[in-house]
Amino acid sequence: MRVLIAGGTEFISLHLVRALQRDGHRVAVVNRGRQSGRLPAGVETFVADRTDHAALAKALAGQRFDGLVDATYAPTTGEDVAALLDAPAAVEHAVFVSTARVYDHARPIPFDEDTPRNLYWGDYAKNKIAGEDVLLERHRAHGLPVTIVRPTHVYGPLNTRNNETFFFDRLARGRPVLVPGAGGWLRQFGHVEDLADAMAAMLGNRAAFGRAYNVTGEESVSQVGFVEVIADVMKRPLTLVHAPTPSGGTPAPFGQNLTYDCHAVHTTARVRTELGLRPRYTLAAGLAGTLEWYLREGLDKRAIDFGAEDALLRSLGAR
């Protein structure tokens, strides 16, 4: 297959490039051309800012692709998603990387693919829902084969979200970890290679046409439990310091986006039963591999300003 990826040089999309090449597909990417040195050899490149619809159409004019994966968020509107679909001369199957944050998180867990969507997560959810709706309308009205992928808390090597690395940073330096409140809200994490492998397997699979899938790991874990798993993987002692969140104030720092006050647990029965896909990584195994990357890149030696964190620890009598 000839597959076009919107993006291709960052975290999820770069892992997808590698997975598709591994499986023998011809891979092309369209992006702003700022990080082309990250791409493996043999990847075809088209240069355009996806939010510039005229430039995008010019860059992809006359091109035909067996598969297209929309894996970028700039933020990206529904109009931007439609422009990407319209730019090539033909697309045989479109996959849209959405998010599990389209679901109404005020509802009871776990969330399956039929959980109502709403704007609980604000503009991010609004834009992702708009993108999903563009694809699903093309499927209903014109028969375009489309698939929606809804991951949550993707982790692994090259992560652009400072989540697992946030805790690596503190434990590698022997620091305590602040926890917002009780730290009991449940989270679910999916390894980036599992997500990339799932999308590679979906492309061209008729069973996936017109369907949405939660794609994530099987384990749910509390905020505190996540840090405990990381400490076990690192074989480092762990000191947790619980910090109450002041009324109307800012929670204690805890990863890039792990502090929110609700559970986020999702079922993956549909992708397993319909497509036969399951993750290769347990949470501990995936974190161990990510730690190897973190150490190999020397990230444990990087300079980090812990001044604000130290001030909070002192106010709590912990430093």
Image: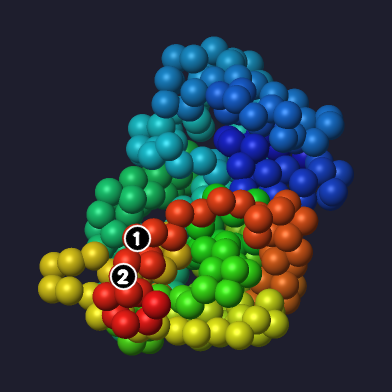
Specify the quadrant of the image occupied by residue 308: bottom left
Specify the quadrant of the image occupied by residue 54: top left
- Name which residue type carries label 1: Ala
Residue 192 vs 13, above or below: the answer is below
Foreground: 253 or 8? Answer: 253
Q: Which residue is mark 1?
A: 308
Foreground: 310 or 246? Answer: 310
- How far apart marks 2 and 1 lie (CA) works out to 6 Å
Label 2: how many residues lie within 10 Å, few (<14), some (14-19) or many (20+)?
Answer: some
- In the rendered structure, the answer to whether residue 58 lies left or right of residue 235 reads left
Q: Which residue is mark 2?
A: 312
* Residue displayed at 70% across by 82% down: 235
Residue 164 visible? The answer is no
- In the rendered structure, the answer to whether residue 79 lies left or right of residue 138 reads left
Measuring from the top left, give residue 137's x and y in whole percent: 40, 45
Secondary structure category for the residue under label 2? helix
Secondary structure category for the residue under label 1? helix
Measuring from the top left, give residue 206's x and y in whole percent: 66, 55
- In the rendered structure, the answer to whether residue 157 lies left or right of residue 160 reads right
Residue 86: assigned label: none
Q: Quadrant of the N terminus?
A: top right
Q: Quadrant of the C terminus?
A: bottom left
* Residue displayed at 45% across by 41% down: 73
Residue 42 vs 13, above or below: the answer is above
* Residue displayed at 57% across by 64% down: 169
Measuring from the top left, give residue 239's x and y in whole percent: 50, 85
Measuring from the top left, give residue 2's x and y in whole percent: 75, 35
Specify the quadrant of the image occupied by residue 191: bottom right
Residue 139 visible? The answer is yes
- Name which residue type carries label 2: Leu
Foreground: 206 or 167? Answer: 167
